[in-house]
Image (cartoon, rainbow, N blue to C red):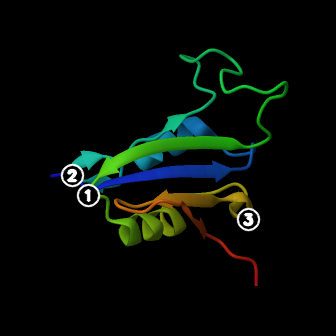
Amino acid sequence: MSQVTDLILITGLSENVEYLKEAFSKFKVRDNPFSMGWIDDKALPKGWYGGSKFFGANVLIGAYNYLDIPSLITFLRNEIKWEDPTWVQLLVQEHGEYKFKLIDLFPED
């Protein structure tokens, strides 16, 4: 049986996505390196997602089985060197849920 969690991570354009992808691999999901796909990956057609403009943010996506969300949040907050943490948002849809929840990793006071 599966317990799939869908994630969407949004960051500012100042973030180096290649650094993020490498840093993410240090987090483990059931002994496997954590990874996320980037909507502007060179392997994808430019602007494949529709509209007449390009995204003004980095958007990374992934789906994971048995993801420990609290551990991931701690990892993202403490182990990643963000250029601009105020941009970082995580959308999470856990198994059995119908809506994504927005997690502001670095809420402003």
Residue beneath the point at 57% across and 59% down: 90
**Which residue position is annotated with label 3?**
86
Element under label 2? Answer: loop
- Please identify the residue farthest to the bottom as the structure is shown: 109
CA separation, marks 3 and 2?
33 Å
The mark that comes first in sequence, 2 or 1, is 2
Residue 107, how many percent across, how many down?
69, 76
Image-quadrant location for residue 82:
bottom right
- For mark 3, give the secondary structure: helix
Query: In the image shown, does 3 or 38 lie closer to the viewer?
Result: 3
Could you tell me which quadrant the C terminus lies in? bottom right
Mark 3 surroundings within 10 Å by alpha-carbon count, few (fewer than 14), some (14 through 19), many (20 or more) = some
User: Left or right: where does residue 2 sit relative to residue 10?
Assistant: left
Residue 40 % position (x, y): 63, 28
Of residue 61 and residue 26, the one placed in the foreground of this image is 61
Mark 3 touches mark 1? (CB < 8 Å)? no
Instruction: Report which residue position mark 1 lands on.
Output: 66
Closer mark to the observer between disc 2 and disc 1: 2
Image position of 5 with respect to 47: above or below: below
Disc 2 residue crowd, few under 14, some 14–19, many 20+, Cα 10 Å: few
Instruction: Classify mark 1: helix, strand or loop.
Output: loop
* Whether residue 9 is situated above or below residue 71 in the rendered picture: above
**Pointers 2 and 1 in contact (CB under 8 A)?**
yes
Q: Residue at x 53, y 45 (%)?
A: 20
* Rendering quarter of residue 95: bottom left
Residue 25 visible in the displayed image = no
Q: Quadrant of residue 51?
A: top right
Amino acid type indicated by mark 3: Thr
Question: Residue 22 or 71: which is nearer the viewer?
Answer: 71
Residue type at tag 1: Tyr
Q: Which residue is mark 2?
A: 2
